[in-house]
Each structure stands twice: as C-alpha cells, then as structure tokens.
Image (cartoon, rainbow, N blue to C red):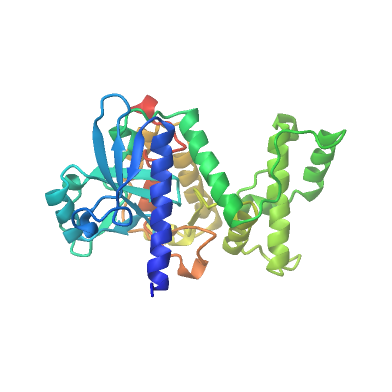
Amino acid sequence: MASKWFAENVFKGRIGEAIVECLLTEFGYKVERIGNEQTNLGNPESMPDLKVTHPVNGEHWLLKVKYRSARPDKFEVRPDELLRYRKEHPGTLLAFASPWDGSIYCAKVEEVPLSKSDGDLSLTAEYWKPIWHFFPLVKQGEQLKNVWKNFQHVMATYGTRQILNRENKTLWDKEYEALDSYLEDTWDPELEQLGISHPKPEQMTLEERWERVREIAAVGLALELLEVAENDDIPTTETLQIMDKVLGRKGEQRLLINLEHMCAAQGIAVTPKNKMIQADIVQALMLGSFSDAERRKLIRRMKEGLEVAYLLDPAIPFDKTDPIDLKTALLLLSTPCRLDLDTSKFD
C-alpha cells in the first residue's frame, strides 16, 4: 500500500508537470510525458518527466520537473540523481515550478552544482534561467500572464470558494454610488497594516472598487472568525492568511518583515520612527521605478544573515513557516523567472 507521503508527492509532482506542460503547449511546443509512470524504458528512476519538441525544426529537450509547496527559497535534489541525468540523459533541463510566486526556474543538469551533500539548491543562485531562455517560442507579455492567471483561477476554484466571480456586469443602478458609500463607511486606518490603502474612488474603476470591497469584507470575516474585540490589535499574520483563503489567493508576494529584528541587526535603535524608515526602504526598493535587473543588483548588495522575513502561504500554518533571510526573500520577489513579470525590456 502506498504511503500518504508517496501519494502527496505524486500529486504535487503532477501539478508541477501540468504547469510546465500547459505553458509550453500554449506556445506551440509538443509535450510528451515520458516519466517512470508512463514508460518502462531504461532505468525508471532516471527517466525525465517530459519530452518537449519544437513544432518546426524538430529540436527536442528532456525535462525533469520539481515542485514543492513549502520553503520556496530552496528545494532538494539528490546529487546521485543529478549525476545519473548527466550520464544517461546529458542536456536534461531541471525545471522547478514554484507555487508561491508563480515562477519556473530552469537549469541544465550540467550547470547545477553537486558540492552540497544535502542536495539543497537555492533558487536565488545565478545559474537559474527563466523558462523562455530555453524555449524562445514562449514570449513574455499578456499571453503569458493570462496563462498563469487562468491556471491560478482553475486551482483556486478547485481548492476554495470564491466570494464573487464577476465579469464586468452592472448589478444594479447607482452601483458606483453604493460602492463609494460602503468604502467610506467601512474604511479604517488600521487596514493599512494589512496592505489595504485608503480608497480614492474618484481614481478607481468599477472593478477596482469591487476588489477593495472584497478585501475589506474579507478582513471583517477574518476578525469575526478570530474573535477579535473592537479595541484589540489586529493579529496581522492570521488575518492575512484568512483573507487569502477567502479571496482565493495563494499568498503571492506576501512578505512579513520583523522590523525590530532588522533594526537591531543593523545597530539601529528600535523606535517607531526607525521602524517606519526601515519599512520605507523596503517599500522603495520593491515598488520604486527600478528595472528588475537594477532591483536585483541592489538587493544582492544587501547585508546577509538577517533572518527577519516570512513568506506567507495560507496553506501553511504560521507556526510552521520558517524565517528566511530578508535578502533571499526580496530576491525571490524580484526573480526574473516569474511568469507575471515582463523582464524582456531589461535584458
């Protein structure tokens, strides 16, 4: 009888393969599943998962796909496994599909280091390339973003109920006025700590108004479930996790930073003013008008060893979420392998 561990890993592996297969198929490549579950040819333990063929010139590639739901900064590949691929299937691409940030990291097995005995590979290493580096028919832009968006929608619909799935239809007369009134009545400055900025209806589209209403409604439900009294502080982490579940989000770009630890590590007195300064630095770095290449260059110059960040995933309890180095967290947020970022203009 198969173990629970085996069943879960088979399921996760299928998800990773599906993401890569659907993406490449969308852009015209022929994809065949050739892994040990599909064939008995050769040594099943060393068979890659996918064979990808160019639709015009017939060139083909072999892919070994990995997928992990936790610890999105690294994943494990046994050194002996890499050695087998190098020997039996040279040129095989190792592809890691990250559910946390919507990225596909790719590298040739010959370029992946074997020095670490534990097999942990860091996703911030320079040898990783985006999937379009190896498959040029995959183009960055709206088509790629829509493929990822549609896949997220399918997964969210399967895994959780959506509050509202709306397709730009007017529900009633005076809809704008009703939404503006709701936003005015329910807004509270404390919502800013949850990433919900003060609404400016005159500058918002109808769908943007609805999105803000959904967020505020999700906060209300979260506080009710957590039994937070009116005068109590909002438990930020737990509230964000419930919001993500309610809204069908996967927690992309959700980063929690312990500013007190950050200040202390840099020898800065822990004061409310300095906490705000540190928050402004991170915000300017991630939201400032830098190119992705410039942003990553700045992040790589940051001091290492500040384990003050948490990458939040609503599927994982916070007490099981490991703190990671802030530099690592920011590099993951700005990775050029993300499917929803267009970095082509910065190459």
Of all residues shown, which one is farthest toward the left? Answer: 87
Of all residues shown, which one is farthest toward the front? Answer: 40
Residue 32 vertical position relative to residue 160 in the rendered view, above or below: above
| Residue pictured at 68% horizontal, 54% vertical | 190
Where residue 9 sits, quadrant-wise, is: bottom left
| Residue pictured at 74% horizontal, 35% vertical | 201
Of all residues shown, which one is farthest toward the bottom? Answer: 1
Left or right: where 30 falls relative to 278: left
Quadrant of the snapshot with the C terminus: top left
**Closer-to-camera residue (212/250):** 250
Residue 280 vertical position relative to residue 77 in the rendered view, above or below: above
**Closer-to-camera residue (238/270):** 238
Q: Position of residue 231 (x, y in %)?
A: 74, 66
| Residue pictured at 82% horizontal, 47% vertical | 185
Q: Is residue 146 visible?
A: yes
Left or right: where 259 falls relative to 97: right
Q: Position of residue 199 (x, y in %)?
A: 71, 40
Q: Position of residue 172 (x, y in %)?
A: 85, 36
Residue 337 vertical position relative to residue 202 in the rendered view, above or below: below
Q: Position of residue 259 (x, y in %)?
A: 48, 57
Quadrant of the snapshot with the N terminus: bottom left
Where residue 84 sits, quadrant-wise, is: bottom left
Residue 86 vertical position relative to residue 287 in the rendered view, above or below: below
Q: Is residue 268 visible?
A: no
Q: How many marks?
A: 0
Left or right: where 175 falls relative to 219: right
